[in-house]
Amino acid sequence: MQKATARTGSGWLTLWNGLLWSCLLICWGGAARAETLQAPVGGRPFGTGTARVICTIPGDGWVLDTSRQRVRPPISDDAIGKVTEVKIAATLGGCSSPTASLRLVATARWPTIEPGSVVLSPDISTVELRGRRLTGAVLGWRTEAGTGSDICQVPRLEANAEHCTFKVGRGISADPGAQVLTWAPAGGRIGSDVVTFDLDGQLAPPATFQLHPARVELTGLLPPDSAIDLSEARGEVQLSHPEVIRSAECAPARCNVAGGKLIVRQLSSEVGSLDVKFALLPKVVLLKPDGTEGKPTAHLAVLHCPMSVVSGPPLRGLDSARIVVRIEGRCANAINNFVFETEDSQLKVVTTQGDATGVFVLLQLGRVDSDHIQLTASQARDDVVVAVTHVATRPPPAVRVSLEIPGHRNLDFIPNNRPAIAHFPSVEAPGRLVIVPQEGVYHVGSGPEQTVTGDKNAAGLATLRVAYRVDGLPGELKNADLGILSDPLQRGVREAATPASIGISAQSPTPLVEFLCGPVGAIQRVMPGLTSHLPFRQRDDCRIVFHRERLPTKFGTQKLNLSIEVSNADGAVRPEGRVSQTIVLRSGETPVIAWIRGVIQPYDRVIVRLSHAPDETHYVGALEINTGAPEVMWTAIFGRGRARLYATTAVPTGLYRFGDSRYSGLMSLNFGVVSRLTWLDSDGREGFLGLEAGVMVLGISADKSATGQSLTQVGTVTGLGLSVPIANRAAPTQASINLHGWVEFAVLNGDKDRVAFIFGPSISIGNVGTNL
């Protein structure tokens, strides 16, 4: 019956080829013409078809006859493979404006192929054949995915023949009767738009170029590690080449082939394996280590439970690799009785979790170096395989963690005083990377962003460990570590010191650093940016307070430059009050205090400057610290008052007395003690004009009036004076130059009731008094 069917199929094939050839001859002169005409070099002329005239003279050795409807191929082998395009028209008159074109191709002389030598190996995608003149020969193939071709570049020489191996597309049909292989001579083309002529100029039928395998060699009928799953009513196994299988037997079960699959029914649940005998088409064999087989038998494991990998491809090359599988069907209730294995080892069950779809099992896979693995589940008591699955592995993703604190990226250390945001390279969904903590080294945050904070007691270098996880797994399995990877960069664990906002906080109610004066209960705060006027009595009760208890630990240790400068009212700096040092401030429970010293005289000015030290080894982003000006500055003047009353010694020179003629005249040298009352400005500087009163010894150098009367006498003076300090302003040793206008009352050596007016300059030394 089968042989008769084969002969009948061959007859239909011959009839079909004849009809195709007849259609081609009929349509040759019609509108549907081939685009490419090819013929061997040295061949006879051939016609281009009726109602087709070549308008242009072809090159490359082609010769056109006078009718312009026949051409002769080139005679030189140099033309092999060259394409010559010519314009064509229906008549000679149409050549004035031709719109169609035709390609001419010269091929080599046709090869001879031994029909019995053609061997198709679809599993390794090759076709082998023997013959002559095979150099440059073209083999075309067709699959469901498309068409393609290969060329025999250098055939292998054998006894009285040449041998070529062609590559064909994957998925090519293994049926030896399928019309999937064609050939063309060297330089030729293959396609539905190609018409080929022989050496005699005759049109060659398409069947001439069809190639039928004398033998088809298969390496397998089923995919590797195929098994029959009995969790459903019937078992199905995908066949590798269902087109070559005529029948299948698998007693005591029932088998048949349908839809490209092996269908198994009526198989006992007690059976652990099944042998299937296949009958193949003629000319089809299965390769075996010891030869070939035309009626092969396949051994299939019988699986009772469907099992699938739900965590995606596992990571290879890692000792920490894990995998999550799902067991469905009736086996889900007996999961504790199963043993899971790969080809190399038995796997440890880490945890299980069930839902409505089955049971999920987290397995410790360990190190895998192969591209794929086979995973089996067996009954522990009798070693019967109940489930098998296969999965490809993948290389671990590249791990390069970048740490960032606000304003500072790519840290080369792990901060132990504040969390650093971790950035990862992207990985293929649904995978994701997360940092896993290391006890005693660092811990990770639980917020929306992944953060890492070093342990306070950690020292040395540390490597960040990153876990590979997969989203979409049920319950806690979505947080299961399916592989642990390490960042190649080693980082130190230390404090991330960033400049705290000392200047901004100094204006707030809770400053980090402040200038205070006065005892507890009467403390006065000096505000930055203003000049504060403090009582002189508080000169020994002022201090700079560094509030360690207010310093957030996230800023780390602060390295500050403290500068204190004390100057008198005249602007001279007091060396004993100068301070310039670096303050290291750490977060703590109690503040640190620096006392102000060096204030000696009223209206001494204290200027305190505070700035961050631009130390690149200490601060993160130290280059951004402004070194041109302090971050915060306080100014205080110790002294208050609107006026000053003080006594000074005066040495007037060149005073002139205006009185009666006996006592008027110039007094070149004088001496006395004068009290002076004047106003004070906000910086403690005296006003130029003041009220003066005192006792003067006048005319010490025996000065005489115009009448010869001695001008020497003792008198009291009162009046106004202009005073300009020239040294030691506001000090007891203050020196000034003055201009006086006094009313004098004689006391000794003259008429006691005499009154005169004195005017002139003086030099005064001293400033002993009080501020009012």
Image (tube, rainbow, N blue to C red):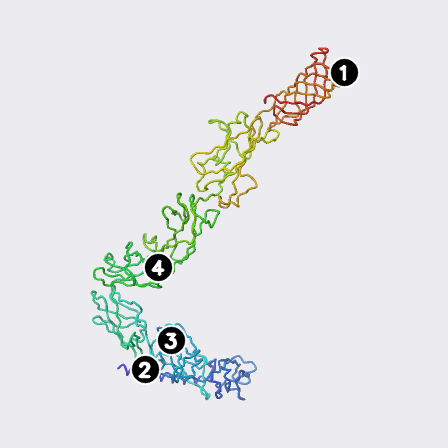
Sequence-wise, the earlier of marks 3 and 1 is 3
Indicate which label's residue lies in the foreground, 3 or 1.
1
Q: Are marks 4 and 2 in contact (CB under 8 Å)?
A: no
First-in-chain label (2 vs 3): 2
Decide which of 119, 596 is in the foreground and name it. 596
Instruction: Give the secondary structure at mark 3.
Output: strand
Name the amino acid, label 1.
Lys
- Say if 268 sits above or below 8 in the image: above
- Residue 32 placement, left or right of 608: left
Decide: marks 3, 4 in contact (CB < 8 A)?
Answer: no
The location of residue 163, given as percent across then percent down, is 39, 80
Q: Secondary structure at mark 4?
A: loop
- Viewer can see residue 41: yes
Could you tell which of marks 4 and 2 lies nearer the N-terminus? 2
Q: Left or right: 647 with respect to 334?
A: right
Can you identify the residue that label 4 sits on? 314
Question: Which class describes the residues within 10 Å of circle 2: few (<14), some (14-19), or many (20+)?
Answer: few
Residue 360 or 398: which is nearer the viewer?
Answer: 398
Q: x, y (%) of residue 711? A: 74, 15
Q: Residue furthest top?
A: 752
| Mark 1 vs mark 4, CA separation in Å | 123 Å
**What residue did someone put label 2 on?**
9
Q: Amino acid at mark 3?
A: Thr
Sequence order check, earlier mark of 3 and 4: 3
Q: CA distance from mark 3 to mark 4?
A: 33 Å
Mark 3 is surrounded, within 10 Å at the Cα level, by few (under 14), some (14 to 19) or many (20 or more) other residues, namely some
Quarter of the image that includes the C terminus: top right
From the viewer's perspective, is the residue at label 2 or at label 3 nearer? 3
Q: Earlier in the sequence, mark 2 or mark 1?
A: 2
Q: Nearer the viewer, mark 4 or mark 2?
A: 4
Reading the image, the residue beneath label 3 is 126
Marker disc for residue 704: 1
